Image (cartoon, rainbow, N blue to C red):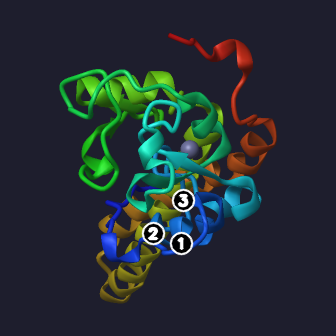
Amino acid sequence: MQWYLILKNTEKQPDKGTYSDWKPIVAEECFYQCVYCAIHESQFGGIVNYHIDHFRPKSLFAALINDLANLYYACPICNRFKSDDWPDEPSLDKVSYPEPCKVDYNTLFEFDDKYSLIGLFTASKYLIHRLYLNRAQLIFERRETAMRKKVGQLITEIQAMIGQLADADLKDAYATLSKIDSVKNNLIGLDEVRRKVRPYVTGDIKKS
Ligand SMILES: [Zn+2]
């Protein structure tokens, strides 16, 4: 899972309709995934289940209600947690929401070895807390993505190993074999983990 910097282009502002008519445009601009947690719409039943997020909440910024530049694609969980929350104007050093068209969200976080996000700025720490970005579903998705990447790398190494076997240089080949075993065991366990994953558990969520 990764985030994308969203390119907002004022020329795209539709000249008819209101924001609820423009969900397909917003979805395309946002790469069909939640701008906050990066979960793809395919993991959540598609566009009908996704929401249009008013980055600056419509309850506080009535003039921006139909401004395409203020609209982002969000999963129902992040959208619900964000709601009308607007602690401050965006700034990485303040409790605030970084604007997805100005800040590449990939630069806001690091992952720990359990696939949890660690916030690198005051704003990203707040995002993790307020939108609960370490919920079970997201941790599972990150783990699965990492596993897929590892499988791809291993296939490349296996291909190299086959070459080494032909050259009778077996030391590196044995090292690759032990990695294959570890990834295989991790992958076998993954389906079992998925069945136990709920998007989040209400008691886990600490509202500020
Ligand atoms: Zn989300």
Tag 1 residue:
25
Q: Residue 118 in the image: x percent, y percent?
A: 35, 29
Q: Residues within 10 Å of mark 1 (few under 14, many from 20)?
A: some
Q: Residue 108 in the image: x percent, y percent?
A: 28, 40
Q: Residue at x 31, y 65 (%)?
A: 171
Q: Residue at x 21, y 32 (%)?
A: 92
Question: Are discs 2 and 3 less than 8 Å apart at CB?
Answer: no
Disc 1 residue type? Ile
Discs 1/2, front: 1
Q: Nearer the viewer, residue 145 or 101?
A: 101
Indicate if the residue with disc 3 has its beta carbon within 8 Å of ligand 1. no
Left or right: residue 37 compared with residue 76:
left
Query: SS of the residue at dot 3?
Result: loop
Asked whether residue 178 appears in the rendered view, the answer is no
Question: Are discs 3 and 1 less than 8 Å apart at CB?
Answer: no
Q: How far apart are the two marked residues, 2 and 3, measured between alpha carbons?
A: 10 Å
Q: Residue at x 41, y 26 (%)?
A: 86
Q: Quadrant of residue 61?
A: top left
Q: Is residue 160 above or below residue 171?
A: below
Q: Residues within 10 Å of mark 2 (few under 14, many from 20)?
A: some
Tag 3 residue:
33
Q: How far apart are the two marked residues, 3 and 1, measured between alpha carbons?
A: 13 Å
Question: Are discs 1 and 2 less than 8 Å apart at CB?
Answer: yes
Q: Residue at x 79, y 35 (%)?
A: 196
Q: Residue 99 in the image: x percent, y percent?
A: 31, 45
Q: Nearer the viewer, residue 40 or 158?
A: 40
Q: How far apart are the two marked residues, 1 and 2, measured between alpha carbons?
A: 6 Å
Q: Nearer the viewer, residue 40 or 57?
A: 57
Tag 2 residue:
29
Q: Quadrant of residue 153?
A: bottom left
Q: Is residue 43 above or below residue 83?
A: below
Image-quarter location of ligand 1: top right
